Image (cartoon, rainbow, N blue to C red):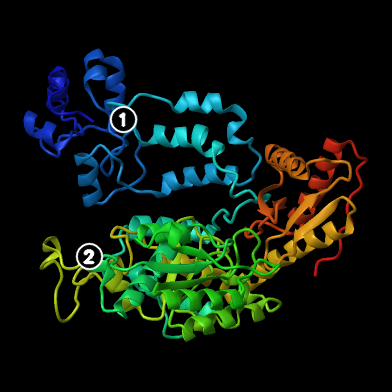
């Protein structure tokens, strides 16, 4: 494509017109040279001329998309008039996606075979290829796709690997990936009366029903458990101080508050307390039982003591699947205590709420209906792309009072009243006033797609499979003389370790075993400190992960521990799956 001001090209342009040729120009160039839209040459002919004329080669700018019928350097089939106008007015490719998505899909399929080395295997090579100064001129979309395929995608994360069981995260399933892409293109903002926004609310209702939350609960999506807990505790703060005649969202905190959690609670609870002005030091750790579950008796004592001192109790935070061990706090007695003391009862189920689908552990969720708020992360067990958490509250208007932006002049008059005839006649449900995000993607379509694809039955099968895998690891550890279960599994986490009688520092030994596992890149758990013992801690939540990966992990721990201690290797027996 020719750019305005390319004066060395004038003779060539004139020659093409004189010969009834046609040349593809940007609008500014066309206006400058008095050339009409009909005066264009075929893109291939233009490219051929460019190779033979130095002035043209140096002065012309070949663009990455061409109008309909022009075989430009990166043409991808016919374009509409709107696409043609956009392509001619902007340097960025905004045209058809199908061809490039096919190319990208091939690259991603290759990645998902997990046959590549870890990103750090030859980090110097891809870092050198990618480390460039800020480009003054772009290289075009095809070159970008080529660099993605050669240098970026093959050196991606281990998180989607079926052998990855560290932390509580996993790679997305295909439905989640595709629905996320669809939203990125067709509904890039969570506003308007669109099908995507309809699915935002419908999918929240599906999640509530799936996890047996009270029918009156309403939700809002956010970026994950960190923000989800922040929103829930923001609602708790609002409710607690409103009952005492103040509006903390408007006026700030006038009295100290307190949040009751345990040492097993996720540290996002502490960060939320800091952000909300309550303070990290205001998070009180209630004593736990031998299984790491909050003690109702200890909670009752703390509530009594603080009530006598005049401290405002903001929330009781119970775990429905603790991060380190997967333990579930006794929800009913804790909820009843919270109600008796008129304290907000929050249940953090970011990881473990889907466990309610497994009938073997479903009784542990008794009392969930007493909660004032519940959070869950669809980007964990449901297999959504990372960046989707959900907060449910018994009264969504409390979220509105806690997080509303209030009326803004820059929105005044933007929407219509009365009959809705256009998707922009209304912004839709004001999710932005229920949380801290104004700009937000269409997350509901992703959750809808995940549930629509496999249903309650498919998700139940996944949860049960993963819980069974954790039990299998525990069974094999119990059966082996050099393995020890540090904490019995409740859900899909099993904390165990390698033991050797003559080893003076078992924590250091298991730290070395774990690091060797990571470097081998076959089985990649994380670790956790449980009662002073460093445990190897797999958490099975990935859709690609199967029972074979649980067995392979145990085998590799034994083999690695035996090699490091100079012990003859003997595999632990593998019992039949439950």
Mark 2 residue crowding within 10 angstroms, few (<14) / some (14–19) / many (20+): some
Instruction: Say which of marks 2 and 1 sits in front.
Output: 2
Question: Element at badge 2?
Answer: loop
Depth check, front residue: 70 or 5? 5
Q: Position of residue 187 (x, y in %)?
A: 32, 61
Compared to residue 362, the image places residue 51 above or below, namely: above
- Label for residue 406? none
Q: Is residue 340 left or right of residue 249?
A: right
Q: Which residue is mark 1?
A: 138
Q: Which residue is mark 2?
A: 405
The C terminus: image quadrant:
bottom right
* Residue 429 in sight in this render: no
Q: Is residue 283 left or right of residue 533?
A: left
* Residue 241 in sight in this render: yes
Residue drawn at x 15%, y 17% is 8
Q: Position of residue 49 (x, y in %)?
A: 27, 21
Residue 322, picture quadrant: bottom right
Residue drawn at x 25%, y 27% is 61
Compared to residue 450, the image places residue 171 above or below, namely: above
Q: Position of residue 557 (x, y in %)?
A: 79, 46
Question: Element at badge 1?
Answer: loop
Residue 331, picture quadrant: bottom right
Compared to residue 59, the image places residue 69 above or below, namely: below
Residue drawn at x 60%, y 71% is 294
Mark 1 residue crowding within 10 angstroms, few (<14) / some (14–19) / many (20+): few
Depth check, front residue: 300 or 561? 300
Kindly report the distance in space between the C-alpha atoms of the residues bearing marks 2 and 1.
39 Å
């Amino acid at each position: 494509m020719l750019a305005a001001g390319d004066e060395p090209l004038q003779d060539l342009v004139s020659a093409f017109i004189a010969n009834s040729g046609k040349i593809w120009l940007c609008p500014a160039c066309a206006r400058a040279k008095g050339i009409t839209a009909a005066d264009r040459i075929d893109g291939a002919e233009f490219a051929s001329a460019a190779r033979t004329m130095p002035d043209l080669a140096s002065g012309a700018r070949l663009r990455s998309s061409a109008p309909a019928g022009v075989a430009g350097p990166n043409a991808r089939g016919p374009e509409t008039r709107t696409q043609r106008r956009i392509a001619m007015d902007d340097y960025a490719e905004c045209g058809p996606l199908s061809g490039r998505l096919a190319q990208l899909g091939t690259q991603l399929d290759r990645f998902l075979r997990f046959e590549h080395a870890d990103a750090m295997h030859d980090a110097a090579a891809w870092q050198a290829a990618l480390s460039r100064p800020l480009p003054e001129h772009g290289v075009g979309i095809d070159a970008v796709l080529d660099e993605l395929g050669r240098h970026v995608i093959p050196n991606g994360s281990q998180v989607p690997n079926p052998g990855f069981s560290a932390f509580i995260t996993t790679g997305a399933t295909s439905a989640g990936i595709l629905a996320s892409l669809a939203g990125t293109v067709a509904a890039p903002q969570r506003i308007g009366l669109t099908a995507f926004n309809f699915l935002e609310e419908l999918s929240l209702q599906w999640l509530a029903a799936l996890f047996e939350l009270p029918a009156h609960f309403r939700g809002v999506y956010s970026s994950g458990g960190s923000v989800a807990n922040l929103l829930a505790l923001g609602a708790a703060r609002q409710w607690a101080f409103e009952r005492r005649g103040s509006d903390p969202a408007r006026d700030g905190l006038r009295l100290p508050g307190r949040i009751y959690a345990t040492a097993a609670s996720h540290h996002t609870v502490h960060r939320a307390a800091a952000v909300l002005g309550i303070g990290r030091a205001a998070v009180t750790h209630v004593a736990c039982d031998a299984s790491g579950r909050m003690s109702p008796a200890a909670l009752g004592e703390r509530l009594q003591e603080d009530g006598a001192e005049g401290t405002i109790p903001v929330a009781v935070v119970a775990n429905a699947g603790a991060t380190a061990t997967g333990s579930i706090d006794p929800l009913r007695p804790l909820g009843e205590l919270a109600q008796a003391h008129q304290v907000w009862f929050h249940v953090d189920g970011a990881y473990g709420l889907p466990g309610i689908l497994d009938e073997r552990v479903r009784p542990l969720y008794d009392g969930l209906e007493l909660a004032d708020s519940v959070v869950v992360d669809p980007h964990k067990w449901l297999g959504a792309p990372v960046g989707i958490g959900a907060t449910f509250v018994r009264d969504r208007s409390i979220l509105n009072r806690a997080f509303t932006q209030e009326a803004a002049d820059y929105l005044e008059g933007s929407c219509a009243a009365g009959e809705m005839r256009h998707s922009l006649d209304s912004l839709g449900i004001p999710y932005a006033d229920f949380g801290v995000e104004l700009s937000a993607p269409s997350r509901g379509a992703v959750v809808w797609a995940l549930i629509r694809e496999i249903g309650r039955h498919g998700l139940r099968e996944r949860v049960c499979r993963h819980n069974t895998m954790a039990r299998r690891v525990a069974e094999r550890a119990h059966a082996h003389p050099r393995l020890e279960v540090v904490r019995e599994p409740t859900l899909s986490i099993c904390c165990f370790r390698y033991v050797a009688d003559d080893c003076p520092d078992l924590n250091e030994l298991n730290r070395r075993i774990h690091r060797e596992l990571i470097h081998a890149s076959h089985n990649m758990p994380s670790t956790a400190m449980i009662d002073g013992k460093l445990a190897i801690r797999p958490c099975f939540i990935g859709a690609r992960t199967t029972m074979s990966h649980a067995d392979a992990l145990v085998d590799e721990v034994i083999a690695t521990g035996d090699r490091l201690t100079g012990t003859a290797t003997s595999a632990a027996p593998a019992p039949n799956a439950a």
